[in-house]
Amino acid sequence: MWIAESDGRPGDPGAAEIRVTLSQSGPRYVSADSEFAVWAATLGEERDGEPVTLVGPLGHVNPGDQLVCTGGFSEHARHGWRFAVTTFRSSLPQSPEGIALWLQTRVPGIGRTFARAIVDHFGAESVFKELDRDPERLREVRTKAGRAISRKSVERAIVAWREVATIREVETFLFTHGISAGLAARLVRQYGENVVALLMQDPYRLTELPRIGFKIADRIARSIGIELDDPQRLRAGLLFVLEQAESDGHTFLPLEDLWQAAAKVLAVGELEQLESAVRTLVLAAEVVLDGQRAYVSELYEMECRLGAALGERARATPVELFAAPNRPDVQVSDEQWAVVELVRTRPLVLLTGLPGAGKTHTQRVLVDTARRARKRVLLCAPTGKAARRMRDLTGHDAMTIHRALGYSPAEGGFQRDEDSPLSDDFDLVIVDEASMLSLELADALFRAAGDCHVLLVGDTDQLPPIGAGSVLADLVECGVVPRVHLTAIYRQAARSLIIQSARRINAGELPFLSFEEARDTLGPEAEFDEDFFFIGRNGPESMRQAVVEVVCERIPARFGLDPRTDVMTLVPMRRGPVGLEALNAELEQRLNPGNRPVVVARSGLRLGSRIVQTKNDYTPDREVMNGEVAFVIEWDDEEGEARLSLDDGEREIVVPASALETYDLAWALTVHRSQGSQFPAVVAPWSTAYAIMLSRALLYTAVTRAQRLCVLVGERKAVAIALARSDERRRHSALAERIVDAAG
């Protein structure tokens, strides 16, 4: 191994190939297209070896990966010595310690003791060869004390080894084509052990997987000889553009936008070729052309079906759900009581309003009134956090829409539909946080609604849903569905500077950035709660330090809140010095210190980490929905299992290490992932470094996630930029006009 000289100069500046271990903390920088990256690494297999900085096509590799890189050293005037990577490949460890660590982190069922025993039994030079030949030989392994490994661990490791061996083959294939091995496990789980043959036949199948871009698939395709104007490539590129539009929230693309985007992706500008490829996709029923709109077929069918269902409800003759009730003694305004009267007679009603206007109180009154009339009421919301908030605030049971519709991947999706409607068990369905309803989820809900009356409750000024469509906004826009918009602010809510500032943001005005500003505006006699603060900071480093200080020291000292459980940092973006990844890494060190056992090396999860599920997991006994937060409270090294405590305070679950790959650190969340949740205290860094993402809806959503305290840290200019962007890029959707057409 070469040794760096004291001035940072490498011992062998002419080295053309080096073996490195990437930093566990992630890349220092990743380009916008996720191709180029800058990594800190160490030479060899040891994490405390000589440091080296890598630059090159490393945007898709993972923390902790061991690589063999080819390229060369050069000295940058500002950044010093760096190794510019031209190609790289996965590197299996060679030392006993490195092999034991690899076994422990890559093979479910192999804990620390088992891993060391395996290396001792087979020898470092023979482990991979012997276990690839016959993984059943794991049954021979004994600890140094002669003790057998638990049968459960051995059986799991034998099964896992076969998959791991396949993954290594796929890694080699991917590296041959200049692609990160980090995709290998996903590809094997998606396509099975014949994935390499499948990709050689149709590399564009890769674009079916979330977050795998056309560039990656195209790189393989081009390397195996597929030409730029190959019809297969053109069709794949057009589908990718439409699917990207869907991930951006659009249900369709205007044809002009489709041609422009496809030409950019494909580097082929011949309109005739693109039109021919689209006609082929239409004949294959993968794409629908509706006038000048291009849809992925499934989204077209959903939009038409949902538009017809909502239009039918809008034009339906009023039918009493229950007899006209007496107005209750509890305080209820005329507009709140109007909601009860509308829901009583109309099959679909919208309830919208700003924070503090009484949407929750209205739901409580409606539920109590309907139940006194002996009507069966279902309360539901798009996320588990939102459903629990609904339950806590109304005092009645609530569940996720997915659970209400009996979602089961094993059974093919939603089990409740036209043939098994909700009206078999309920008379009234109330959906909170309806601004989060995507086209797909709303379609499933109304397919199953049957004869139920439905009330959708939400705030159209929040961020639109993560999926395609903006159903609540479209329903408001169409103007044919009965709607009550609450505007009054009640005394208790009026005291909150969180509520007051949120309303000012919604109106395009600066929030109260100081108590003096609040007094000047509200009047010297006004009483208000000191629950909203602005801490001015310029520059990412100053801002990052301020956020960490506020979370870890100032809030606990002044407000007595636990920074581990009561405070959430909400950020606009993942990357950057004050982005999600950087803040989570910093807060993990401050709030979960010590040499805790590592649970998932890729994302830096350890015993004691606060984590968030990033996809829906419907596995029995450990069902956790996307966006739910938990703590790692126990780690069984031998079994390779973690015990998690969900932040609902009601459940603990046991999760194998392989299933923890879908969890990330959660001391900080993106504002988008926080939708439907609220936290006792929110800290929100707000920087011009996020300029591309800043919008009024984003700021409004971040502030309204706070229950008791909100601290905005950053630059006035960044706040002003967000306020100026009131019309976030409009989503392409024809749902509103389809509702109007169906309503007649």
Image (cartoon, grey):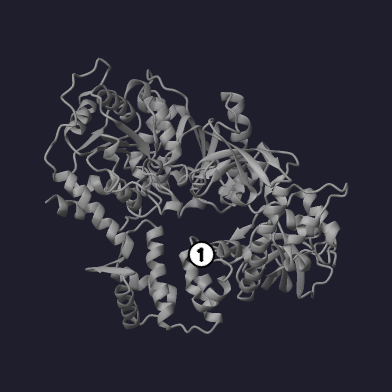
Q: Is residue 667 above or below residue 95?
A: above
Q: Position of residue 591 (x, y in %)?
A: 66, 37
Q: Position of residue 743 (x, y in %)?
A: 14, 49
Q: Is residue 130 left or right of residue 209?
A: right
Q: Is residue 644 left or right of residue 80?
A: left
Residue 503 seen in the figure: yes
SS type, badge 1: loop
Q: Is residue 400 left or right of residue 472?
A: right
Which residue carries the number 1 mark? Answer: 212
Residue at horizontal 40 percent and vertical 81 percent from the top: 231
Q: Position of residue 498 (x, y in %)?
A: 42, 31
Residue placed furthest toward the right: 145
Foreground: 194 or 699?
194
Query: Looking at the rendering, in which quadrant would you find the N terminus?
Result: bottom right
Number of marks in picture: 1
Residue at horizontal 47 percent and vertical 45 percent from the top: 673
Based on the displayed image, in which of its 4 quarters is residue 321 positioned? top left
Residue 82 seen in the figure: no
Q: Position of residue 485 (x, y in %)?
A: 24, 35
Q: The disc labelled 1 sits on which kind of residue? A: Ile
Q: Is residue 39 above or below residue 197?
A: above
Residue at horizontal 47 percent and vertical 84 percent from the top: 227
Q: Is residue 9 above or below residue 451?
A: below
Based on the displayed image, in which of its 4 quarters is residue 170 positioned? bottom right
Few, some or many residues within 10 Å of mark 1 (<14, 14–19, 20+):
few
Foreground: 464 or 78?
464
Residue placed furthest toward the top: 329
Foreground: 481 or 317?
317
